[in-house]
Amino acid sequence: MTAVIGYGPVGGEPGEPRIDMKTWIGDWVLPSPVMTASGCSANGKELDAFFDLTRIGAVVTKSVMLAPRSGRATPRMAETPSGMLNSIGLQGPGIESFVENDLPWLRERGVRAVVSIAGGSVEEYGKLAQVLRYCEEISAVEVNISCPNVADRGQVFACDAKLAADVVSNVRRIIPSEIPVIAKLSPDVTDIVGIAYSVVKAGATALSLINTTLGMVIDTETLRPALAGVTGGLSGPAIRPIAVRCVWQVHEALPDIPIIGIGGIGSGLDALQFILAGASAVQVGTMTFNDPSAPQRVHIELARALAERGFGRFTDAIGYAHRPHEEPLSDFVADAWAEDDRAGEGADPARPLSSGAAG
Ligand SMILES: Cc1cc2nc3c(=O)[nH]c(=O)nc-3n(C[C@H](O)[C@H](O)[C@H](O)COP(=O)(O)O)c2cc1C
């Protein structure tokens, strides 16, 4: 089959068939469904030498906290089979320096910026949101709730439906309604669908699935934990099946909520699994350490993979693996179009109801 390159900002070489790669997170339209994942490429500058950051969907910045932090003691990284373990401990400059130095850099280049925030209490998330509400250059806020609540014996927000909802509703109340608030969930829970329901009820526009999963490596030479922080977050291809399962379960329960799939994505086919499971977008994290141009490459490979499978638009593939057995692509797409017709005139035909309802 003829090579098919992505429509729009990445690829789209003259004379080649095109595929419409735009997607929606609430009312926010992105020209590409591929973003960077928080913490894996700092705040964008490091990737700037490798590709044009305006050509992917968005850059998700490293989770920023209120005060500057030096992070945990070293060693903070360990290699694992098909992945890595990290316990960096949210090292960063603090929100004031971030707003002064990092955000303007992204704005000057026209990069869509998703700002990731992290806090140690519900109030701290609120204070971060208060600072960000006046920053015009923000496309969305991603709330990293995989942090311990210092006010409650270190209980991780993301592992408790009520705590998670308290954080999200506090941020949603403060961030202007036209800016999506994305809740990033942890896989380290018994019932991820329950947590998803809870944060959506609290006002999350969309969900990022998943953050790292807790792991541990013991150094058999020193006979001690390999990381100074003892445990760490496992990422990379090793967690991909867990992430795809989370996306599948949450999409099945909440089909109208846009999901951003994350976990071991390093190729277009990896990304395609997440889209077919129900993701409206994806983020590329650990694999950018191997190949800094991975986000751009994943976009191009995904466009090609979709076209090779007969899709004309990216959004037609969202959740396609959930269709009843043997339903041909044309019926699946026709159903989506019928839904669009019911949604009223003037709607972009590529916009699925399932990624706009929560706006
Ligand atoms: C070194 C490193 C730092 C990370 N820092 C953050 C962070 O600051 N905020 C956050 O929400 N997730 C952070 N993550 C998690 C990633 O954004 C992503 O959710 C996770 O690694 C799974 O995706 P991947 O397998 O593609 O890396 C970090 C991951 C790694 C490996």
Image (cartoon, helix red, strand yellow):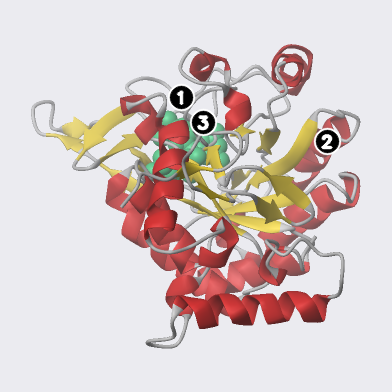
Residue behind label 1 places its C-beta within 8 angstroms of ligand 1? no
Q: Amino acid at mark 1?
A: Arg
- Compared across the picture, whether 350 is left or right of 70 comes to right
- Percent x, y of residue 152: 64, 52
Q: What whole-number distance in Å separates the C-alpha atoms at marks 3 and 2?
A: 21 Å
Depth check, front residue: 299 or 80: 299
Q: Residue at x 67, y 70 (%)?
A: 354
The amino acid pointed to by label 2 is Lys
Q: Nearer the viewer, mark 1 or mark 3?
A: 3
Q: Which comes sooner in the sequence, label 1 or label 3?
A: 3
**Left or right relative to 180: residue 22:** left
Q: Secondary structure at mark 3?
A: loop
Name the residue furthest front: 15
Mark yes or no: residue 86 visible: no
> Label 3 belongs to which residue?
39
Lower sequence index among marks 1 and 2 = 1
Label 2: which secondary element: helix
Q: Position of residue 236 (x, y in %)?
A: 33, 42
Q: Quadrant of the C terminus?
A: bottom right
Label 3 CB sits under 8 Å from any ligand 1 atom: yes
Among numbered discs 3 and 2, the one appearing first in the sequence: 3
Q: Quadrant of residue 103?
A: top right
Q: Against 148, is 138 above or below?
A: above
Comparing 133 with 280, the one in front is 280
Q: Which residue is mark 1?
A: 72
The tag on residue 127 is 2
